[in-house]
Amino acid sequence: MIYHFIVNPKARSGMGGMVWKMLEPELKKRRTEYFCHHTEKKGHAEKIAAQITEDGKSCTLIVMGGDGTVNEVINGIADPSKVTFGYIPIGSSNDFARGLRLEKDPRKALDIILKPEKMTRIDLGELRNRAGSRRFAVSAGIGFDAAVCHEVCVSKWKVLLNRIGLGKLSYAAVALDRLRKDRPVKMKVRLLDGTEHIFEKTYFAAFMNLPYEGGGFKFCPEASPADGCLDVIVVHGITAIKALFLLPLAFAGKHAGFSGITFLKCRGADVEADVPLPLHADGEPGFPRKEISVRLSETYMNVITR
């Protein structure tokens, strides 16, 4: 077996490169056949994955980076069903690893990848708008959660907290600040079965393939990547103060049951808001839109798990 390692050396403020230097000698020691592809800029991982998989043949891709690198790779893969996917988490949020309960220690993760005992077939989602479509493995969202992702991407908090190993808290810090700034809007969510829901004063809607997003917020505790459905959370009709109270509870998934928290389950939905709102797919920002569609992809991906 030949392994293709796609390494983001800048992940978590340069830790990606350091971890690769630590792991590569182990690959040589085991006489593992591999190619290493270092990303050089945003979007490069997608191009690398496209080049590796363009022939449509089966292959094994190992991603070393964060959720953003994972998102780029799954969008570059020609046919995800032909790929065996391994992941060594080095990002600041790592919701993909958290949701699939993957090994966090790089050495142990590599050992599992080189001697796989379990493979999990996971669904993939697609976020669609007039500009095109984007696959996602963790979640997609519109509104407040996407605004948080946008700001974290340029926030000094992320850099500072990454240096002390607390990068995921950058999402919480930005989220608290956004609650003061964002104004809830009217939102219509139409499921594929024709059911229509209208929500007043909506902060956001998130479509979850895995339970966590935003560095550990367990927004949809029951979400499963292998059930053929997306779990949807809509936060609406509550004050900013109540949202501030519920936000810490969401880390443990204890926000369920409170008024203003609505859960839905679907294979897809169309969303329409009063005004253009920020978007994200796996935390990667997209241009604000008033209308989006979210669907389960027709393809799937096999992930090495434990």
Image: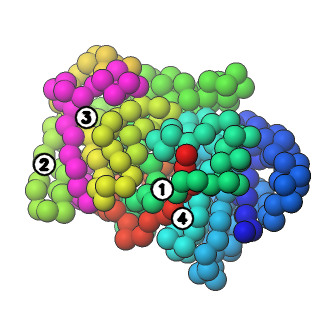
Q: Earlier in the sequence, mark 1 or mark 2?
A: 1
Identify which residue, 106 or 241, lies in the foreground.
106
Q: Which mark is residue 197?
A: 2
What secondary structure is found at the residue carrying circle 1? strand
Q: Which residue is mark 1?
A: 120
What secondary structure is found at the residue carrying circle 3? strand
Q: What residue sits 84% from the left and 41% below the top? A: 22
Examine the rendered structure and indicate whether residue 159 appears above or below residue 226. Answer: above
Q: CA distance from mark 4 to mark 2?
A: 30 Å
Q: CA distance from mark 1 to mark 2?
A: 33 Å
Q: Which residue is mark 3?
A: 235
What secondary structure is found at the residue carrying circle 2? strand
Amino acid at the residue labelled 3: Val
Residue 94 location, quadrant = top right
Q: Earlier in the sequence, mark 4 or mark 2?
A: 4
Mark 2, other Cα within 10 Å: few <14 / some 14–19 / many ≥20: few
Residue 221, magenta (yes or no): no
Whole-percent x and y of residue 111?
71, 47
Q: Which quarter of the rendering shows the N terminus?
A: bottom right
